Image: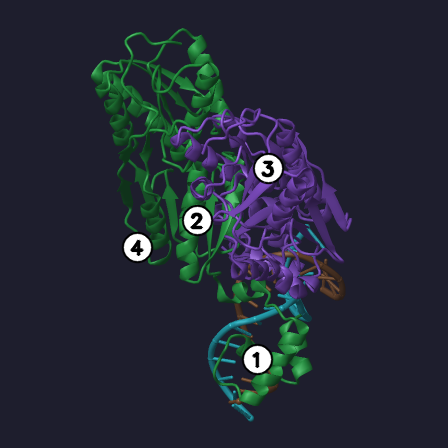
Chain colours: A purple, B green, C cyan, D brown
Amino acid sequence: MRLEDVASKAKVSVSTVSRVVNGFESVKPSTRKRVMAALEQMNYRPNLQARELVAGKSNTLGVIVSNLENPFFVEIFHLLEEQAHKAGFEVLVGNTNYQPDRLATCIDMFLGRRVSGLAIIVSEQVDPELKQLAQAGIPIAFYDAAIPGKRRTGIHFDYGKGMSLLVRHLYDLGHRRMAYIGYPLQLGPTEDRRDAFLAATNKLGVQQRYLAGREHSGYAAGREATRHLLDSGFAPTAILCVNDLFAVGVLRELRSRNIAVPGDISVTGFDNIEIAEFSGPSITTINIPRERIATTIFRSLTAGDQRAQVMIDPDLIVRESTGIAHKKPRA
Amino acid sequence: MRLEDVASKAKVSVSTVSRVVNGFESVKPSTRKRVMAALEQMNYRPNLQARELVAGKSNTLGVIVSNLENPFFVEIFHLLEEQAHKAGFEVLVGNTNYQPDRLATCIDMFLGRRVSGLAIIVSEQVDPELKQLAQAGIPIAFYDAAIPGKRRTGIHFDYGKGMSLLVRHLYDLGHRRMAYIGYPLQLGPTEDRRDAFLAATNKLGVQQRYLAGREHSGYAAGREATRHLLDSGFAPTAILCVNDLFAVGVLRELRSRNIAVPGDISVTGFDNIEIAEFSGPSITTINIPRERIATTIFRSLTAGDQRAQVMIDPDLIVRESTGIAHKKPRA
DNA sequence: TTGAAAGCGGTACCAA
DNA sequence: TTGGTACCGCTTTCAA
């Protein structure tokens, strides 16, 4: 099990076994062979804690996400993982469930494990942790969170532009009464979306309504918010959602009320996850180019490519869920 | 940064600092206060590699899954995580993407990190790794994979029963021509589903057809398989899918061909993930009680509750996607 | 080409 | 209540 066990079995020193394990040249072939055999027989597996302790690093990257149930985060993780593996890194994921204390725990865990880079892809506020992060001494990449500073990369998506594209698209289709369904909490990036919605609709003089879903994500939250919305008396001709998951929930509720989409009401999502293409009807949404995000994170974590700020641009993806506004909205 | 740095700053020994860090009682309040201050100022964070090296364990559980993009796996992970956190464990996830070499790497990584328990929730074959796992010396729980032995818990779901329930349900609705869309590879548990489908249809004398999707999961695979199926000339009145993701893809293709569900063709999924309830139409499926799975895994990993075999029973969930068979199937 | 020994950053035992 | 020290398993000089 340990280097020493193998050493005594092969009748050599631990140094020699270590050399064999790490593929050094300076080992006599016959010795190497003997050691290899012992290694094999004893099913030796290096203790990474020990190895990394002496190395002082771990060629492991840490990724912290708010919500593994949102395919958007999972996709970014996947793309990042792919690049990391190619470069010989392992990737570990931590999940916060939007809980600030979990965030702190995850950060402690990853920094305590001396990961060589940490990607923080969360929606919650990171401020209270900034202090410890500042002294971490490793590259840290943020997506969507907090203020970037030294040794940190802030990657941001232009929500304002994205939301404007949606509002404009709907406006051009004749919509003048729009509702927006967002997250419940004070999550920075999602406030951006709401503010952008408010700004865009105000600018165009569109009647609007803002509503917070009860959960952070998920179909159920979108559905429930839709119930409240429709029962409130505000009869929108279009419903915009903070993400695609919510939009699916909205579609579900509308369907169960026999409200046609986009015949009676248009619906939009955000993120362009796969379900947006496969739901019935498919969902008009904003694409966030994950490859760019993943690549930027990876570079900043490994190549020391620490551009302080990166802004990512949106694309509008028009699908079946949006159409010409009816004069007489149903609800 | 290190215990020693804090010690010299607080003018005490490393032992004392260690005691304070670990909350031992036997420290004079005044000393403790001084140490705490130093700790705070220097932003000390214990090196987990060192700590775990001496401890010989890590109060961390490892979870390996095939596919983080399948919400089914994510849900199990979440439930497991919840219980683990309550019990003071951290949970680390590894992702294999159905690649056997990734599985081996993940296992090496987790065992090398001396996790105190390892859950392997994958569909690929684990046999080649069994040898190393046998010597791991820690509790290992399998879901859906490999042969359980000593120190290992095998949790299995009764796919045969689940598939029978679906076939029977459809049969009772008058269906006599059924197609099944499965995974492409020789993945043990999914072969079970296919075999169960074949067995159940044969028993009832139903015309059947088996088809493999091109990917492991995902909407696109289901959709593509449906294209092949419909273009093949076999005109089923019902399509059964290996999982709910596939079923969503099937629905999408049928919709784009203006084939009504369940009017013209009935569709079923498997797993009962959330989308099955929210898709349009909602999907008749088999529920797999994840709580039981997660709880069983957790217990076997921590409490030494090592029942060798656990079999989990299915529930049939009837929703909108299945209905009475038409005499003249369209396709 | 090989072995001995000094750490890496902690913990824990023993003495003081 | 404190400090000294051996040791966890591995890597890495330095000598032999």
User: Looking at this rendering, what residue extends furthest in the front direction?
Assistant: A328
Chain identifier of the residue bearing label 2 in the image: B
Mark 4 neighbour class, 10 Å CA radius: few under 14, some 14 to 19, many 20 or more: some
Q: Amino acid at mark 4?
A: Asp
Find disc 1 in the rendering and name its residue. Answer: B15
In front here: A2 or B192? B192
Q: Does label 3 lie on the same chain as label 4?
A: no
Chain identifier of the residue bearing label 4 in the image: B
Residues at marks 3 and 1, CA–CA distance in whole angstroms: 52 Å
The percent coordinates of residue A205 (x first, y second) are 66, 39
CB atoms of marks 3 and 2 within 8 Å: no
Find disc 2 in the rendering and name its residue. Answer: B78
The percent coordinates of residue B273 (x first, y second) are 40, 37
Instruction: Pick whichever of labels 2 and 1 is earlier in the sequence.
Output: 1
Q: Is residue B33 above or below residue A303?
A: below
* Dot label at residue A95: none
Chain identifier of the residue bearing label 1 in the image: B
Does residue A111 appear in the picture of this structure? yes
The C terminus of chain A lies in quadrant: top left
Local SS, label 1: helix
Mark 2 neighbour class, 10 Å CA radius: few under 14, some 14 to 19, many 20 or more: many
Local SS, label 2: helix
The percent coordinates of residue B180 (x first, y second) are 36, 20
Q: Amino acid at mark 1?
A: Ser
Disc 2 versus disc 4: nearer the observer: 2
* Dot label at residue A271: 3
* Dot label at residue B305: 4
Q: Amino acid at mark 3?
A: Asp
Q: Amino acid at mark 2?
A: His
Q: Is residue B232 above or below residue A146?
A: above
